[in-house]
Each structure stands twice: as structure tokens, then as C-alpha cells.
Image: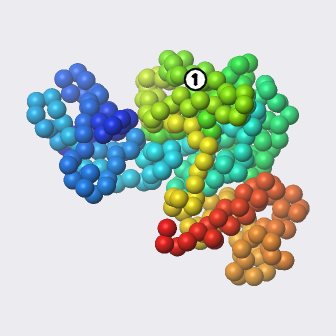
Amino acid sequence: MILGTVIKGVGGLYTVRRDSEYNGEKYINVRGRGSFRHEKIVLLAGDRVELEPLSQGEFFCKKILDRKNSLIRPPLANLDYIFVVISTKKPTPSLFIVDKLISIAEYNKIEPIIIISKSDLDNEYGEEIYNIYKKSGFDVFVTSSEKQEGIDNLLAYLKKITENSEPICAFAGASGAGKSTLMNTLFPTLALQTGNISEKIERGKNTTRHTELFPLSDLLGKEYNGYLADTPGFSLLDFERFDFFSLEDLFDTFRDFKDSVGKCKYTKCTHTKEDGCDVVNRVKNGEIEKSRHESYIELFTTLKNKPRWK
């Protein structure tokens, strides 16, 4: 049995990193079996696959091994950590979009790590974002690629989580948030393309065109395992078009609400505005961040109004 990990896919052709070398090579280009197209099966970066010889030196993907999770945006499978990059300025961050991505990660049992980029542009707002997510129970890093601040702490964290396991880690964030610049600062050998911010619309040019995995052994040293993913930037996670999760799952995607389980006055509490709601009371008391609760309410409204047949 020949096994490997899908590194990237472009136009139906996939690059797979084999678990063992073949003729001195670890990387091989393959296509999925014909039935994948008919069954609408799409290979994702991060997929563990079984390969079948087609002819001398050529292989095709025979089978996708069971996934522990898969995401629509960014398109990845078997993800363990997602590093959510938020800029303090240029572009102005949307905490609602950040919270949507965090909820998607939580639902899929992916650990979100918050990275505040461009702290040199607005250090005060950077501290405000830091306090919101640290208080909400996340690991948070404040960085400035321009001033080389916070880079060593983040690099040490990455090394720690990849030393004795083989995780797939992804960097994700809005276009222009400084994701690729930060990755280049962390890993100079990557040399990812970066883009400028449009002054008119405060949006970055999306320089990453597809999701690609990079072996951490190449970036950090042979003693480190797993993969690092660069993903296309995004400005929208559309819960109306895509089924990320259901209304019934929403509460469990907010880890900062978990201490309120069973403490509300009403058993069918929506945790949006009811008298006697423990979540609402904790927001009023400052135990839960207001912006997080506002994101919850907006997601609740979207999912509640979403037609069931979609």
C-alpha cells in the first residue's frame, strides 16, 4: 500500500508527498480515479490518500482515507490548528468575520490561535483585540513583521506543538491582513508572494491562489513534524450559501459561553436577550466580551432565518 498526503491541487492535478521515497523522490503528481468526478469527490490539501500504480513511474489516487475534518474555506482536510491573522489596520479588521472563522474551527475540532499582525500601525487597538480573545480563552500573539516583534514567541509556540506530533497547521485571514508577510518573516525560505493594500477599498490583493502545504521539517528542522498551510485570503464566510454547521451547534462553538451551561432560567434559552439568561448576565458583568456576544447574535439570526432546504 502506497500512502501519502496531498500537498496541493491545481486544475485536477494533485501533488502528493509520499510517506516513503520512490526512486529517490518523495513528491509525485497524480489525478483522482475516474469515479471521483462522477461522485463529486474533491481531493483537498491535507487529505491522506492511497495511491495505485498506473504505469511505470505514474500513479493515481485510489482512495481517500477517512478525514477527521474538512473545511470549505480555507479548503483543507485533517487540520489541527488554524492561526487566525487579524491586522490592527489596513485593512480594518472585522471581528465578526474572525468570530465566524473561529466558530467553524471549533465545530470541526480545530484549535484556533489568534495572531494580531501589524501591531506597529495601531498598538492600542492591538492590545484591545488581544484582551478580547485572551479573555475568551484563546492563545493570542501580538506581532509586527515590520519591527520583528512577537516573532520569536510565535515561532517557539509552533516548534512546541510540532515537536512530538504531526499536526497540519494553517494560517488564514482576510486579504491584506499580512498573513503571507508574517509567514515569510517566520520562515524566510518560503518566499511567498505578497501584495499591497488598495488605499481606496482597504483590501489586499489576494496573492495566494490556492492552498498549499509545506513540510515543517523543511522549514524548522528535521526534528519537527507536520505541515504548514498557506491559504487564499478571504473577505466572506457565507453561512447562507454554505452549510458550515446548524443553529443547534452554534452555542458549542463559543467556548467562552460554556460556563453558562445549565444556568439559564429557561431551558430553551436562545442566549440572545432573555431575562434570566446567564450568558446575557455575564456579558453585562463583563465576564464575556460584548463583541463576542454580538457575533453570536448575528450568527444566531442568520442560521435561524436560513431555509432548511438550502
Q: Residue at x 67, y 66 (%)?
A: 300
* Rendering quarter of residue 218: top left
Specify the farthest residue to the right.
Answer: 285
SS assignment at label 1 = loop
Q: Residue at x 42, y 54 (%)?
A: 68
Residue nearest the observer in this picture, 194 or 255? 194
Q: Residues within 10 Å of mark 1 (few under 14, many from 20)?
A: some
Q: Amino acid at mark 1?
A: Thr
Q: Is residue 132 visible?
A: yes
Residue position marked by numbered label 1 in the rendering: 194
* Residue 245 horizontal/vertical position (percent): 54, 63
Q: Is residue 164 left or right of residue 183?
A: left
* Residue 196 horizontal/vertical position (percent): 64, 23
Q: Residue at x 67, y 41 (%)?
A: 114
Q: Residue at x 70, y 71 (%)?
A: 261
* Rendering quarter of residue 21: top left
Residue nearest the observer in this picture, 53 or 96? 96
